[in-house]
Image (spheres, rainbow, N blue to C red):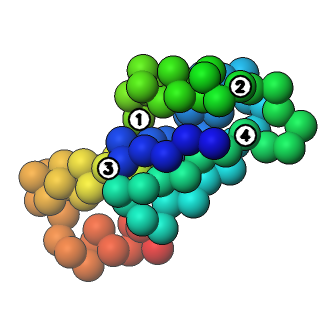
Amino acid sequence: MAITSKEINLYQLDQELGGQGLCGDFNDPKKKLIVPSDNSTITEQELEAAIQSHIAGPSDAEVKMLNRQEGITKLKELGFTEDEITALFS
C-alpha cells in the first residue's frame, strides 16, 4: 500500500509496473491510496519507487476532450458558425 498526493494516472502507473493490477482510492486528493491487486507480485517498495518516478500523462478522455476543443477552435477560425459546429458533432 502507498499513500501519495502526487498526480497519478492509475492505468499508466499499472502499465509501468507490468500491468498486474492496481486499485486506488482518490477521494482525498492529498492522500491517494494505491494498492496492488490481490494476485499482484508487486512489492510495497516497487510500488513506492514507481510512484516517485511516475509522471502522469493525460487520460484518453482528457486527450479526446482537448482534441475536440482544438477542432472546434479551428472550425471557428475557418468561419463555421456555432450551429454548423454543433451539427457536425451531433
Badge 3 amino acid: Leu
Q: Tell me which label, 2 or 4, sits earlier in the chain.
A: 4
Dot in front, 4 or 1: 4
Q: Which residue is mark 2?
A: 43
Work out how far the residue at label 2 is from the one at label 3, CA to CA, in angstroms.
Answer: 36 Å
In the rendered view of the protein, which quadrant contains the N terminus?
top right
Q: Which residue is mark 3?
A: 66
Residue 30 image point, x, y percent: 35, 56
Q: Which residue is mark 1?
A: 56
Work out how far the residue at label 2 is from the one at label 4, CA to CA, in angstroms.
Answer: 8 Å
Q: Tell me which label, 1 or 2, sits earlier in the chain.
A: 2
Outermost residue to the bottom: 83
Crowd band around label 4 with a 10 angstrom C-alpha radius: few (<14), some (14–19), many (20+): many
Dot in front, 1 or 2: 2
Q: Residue at x 24, y 49 (%)?
A: 70
Q: Which residue is mark 4?
A: 36
Residue 47 image point, x, y percent: 60, 28
Q: Quadrant of residue 82?
A: bottom left
Crowd band around label 3 with a 10 angstrom C-alpha radius: few (<14), some (14–19), many (20+): few
Q: Tell me which label, 1 or 3, sits earlier in the chain.
A: 1
Work out how far the residue at label 4 is from the one at label 3, CA to CA, in angstroms.
Answer: 31 Å
Work out how far the residue at label 1 is from the one at label 2, CA to CA, in angstroms.
Answer: 21 Å
Q: Residue at x 49, y 46 (%)?
A: 3
Q: Secondary structure at mark 2?
A: loop
Q: Tell me which label, 2 or 3, sits earlier in the chain.
A: 2
Dot in front, 2 or 3: 2
